[in-house]
Amino acid sequence: MDTSLSAPMTTESPTSKDSGIYLDYNATTPVDPEVYARMEPYFKEYFGNPASAGHHWGWAADNAVQKARGQVASLIGAKANELIFTSGATEANNWVIFGLISKLRNENPYEPIHMITSCVEHSSTMKAMEAAQKLNVEVDFLPVNLYGQVDPEAVRKAIKPHTKLMSFIWVNNEIGTINPISEIAKIAKENQIYLHTDATQAVGKIPMNVTELGIDLMSFSGHKIYGPKGVGALFIRSKDPKVQINPLIYGGGQERGLRSGTLNVPAIVGLGFAAEICQRHLYTEAARLLSLRQLLWQKLQVAIPGIRMNGHPTERSPNNLSVTLPVKTDSLLSHLQKLGVSTGSACSSGAMTVSHVLRGIGLNSDQAQSTLRLSLGRWTTENEILRAADILQNAIPKKIV
Ligand SMILES: Cc1ncc(COP(=O)(O)O)c(C=O)c1O
């Protein structure tokens, strides 16, 4: 196995060397130049509409979409016809929740609906669940342990006779913790409840086979796996059980009537090829990123006394390091301009909002405001990790270190 720390696998880094060190791959990834090259002809000579069934412009576009569907299916262990392209994971997460409510209400407007989720979901699930509550859907937001994991036994206990959906994030976007999705899937199956997972930060980073795991619905996104923004997919299981949700977007009947709208062919081609590259390098890249992350953590522990890591020590995505520093991050930002990282709090309209995920794992407001997420990716090198550790050490006031 190639675990070389400094040799990213494909072309030269698209993250410009002069503009600093990009460690925010969980926010978004650059499009892999090879992916971009595959997309380009679909803006130009192959511009056809895949729904145009009567000429070769349409056929060329349709063939490209079908190829991409196969590439994505192969990465996650699904059948090609179980994938519907969306505008991203936000749409897919919303679709699952409102598409199921719509289906159930059509069948029986009076039957109560209960859904189970957690308090550390991405906002696209959290906010959609809150909106569902306003439609008289009962929702339980389960607490998590100190690492950010849902307890499968707590899931079992939360089930009610009218529970119709469980939705849990697979890999947490802020703290990297991996949820025990396989155990939760068994509980969902025993109770004949649909299990949806937001796998936006899991796909392409950890191996998976949705068919074997018994996942019913799964959302993910192109721009977290070196594909373009504005494209993603929803996996909808076709057998054992055949999952049924109503469309969220109605119109010309594309995607077998489940998601109307002219397909974004270049982006779909990009998502497909991005999936193929991820699959090719899944294990070697995970090992490389894990070594780099461990190196970063070793360096930071020595350089910054009092630093602590958030999330699970081992059950975590290889590319994520969330740390709480002995100082608030807003005091460091001027020093960190050349370091592309995320903070655990944001200032909106003059008020400080603190991450619900960090609160969910028990951090207080000061700790959340002292938290940084460093997320590594395809073009991160050993040299960048060493420089990033230096930058952080130098940013912390000397009386603290
Ligand atoms: C876990 C998770 N879910 C959903 C999303 C939203 O994805 P998209 O940008 O494709 O809508 C993100 C992106 O930050 C994410 O990390």
Image (cartoon, helix red, strand yellow):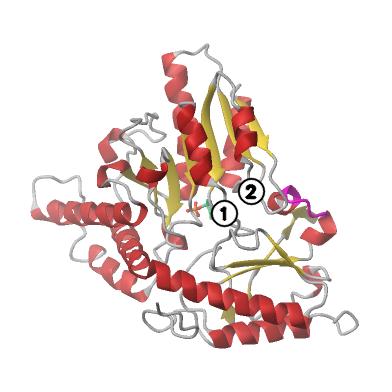
Q: Residue 292: where, in percent of width, then height?
A: 56, 78
Which amino acid, by three-letter code, is at mark 1? Ile
SS at circle 2: loop
Q: Which residues are magenta?
A: 359-364
Q: Residue at x 41, y 37 (%)?
A: 216
Q: Is residue 369 above or below residue 262?
A: below
Q: Nearer the viewer, residue 93 or 134?
A: 93
Q: Residue at x 67, y 59 (%)?
A: 311
Looking at the image, which residue sits at the far left? 55
Q: Which part of the image, by quadrant, shows the N terminus?
A: bottom left
| Quarter holding residue 326 | bottom right
In this view of the protein, can residue 2 be seen by the observer?
yes
Q: Which mark is residue 149?
A: 2
Q: Is residue 246 above or below residue 34?
A: above
SS at circle 1: loop
Q: Which residue is mark 1?
A: 178
> Tag count in the figure?
2
119 left or right, relative to 198: right
| Quarter holding residue 178 | bottom right
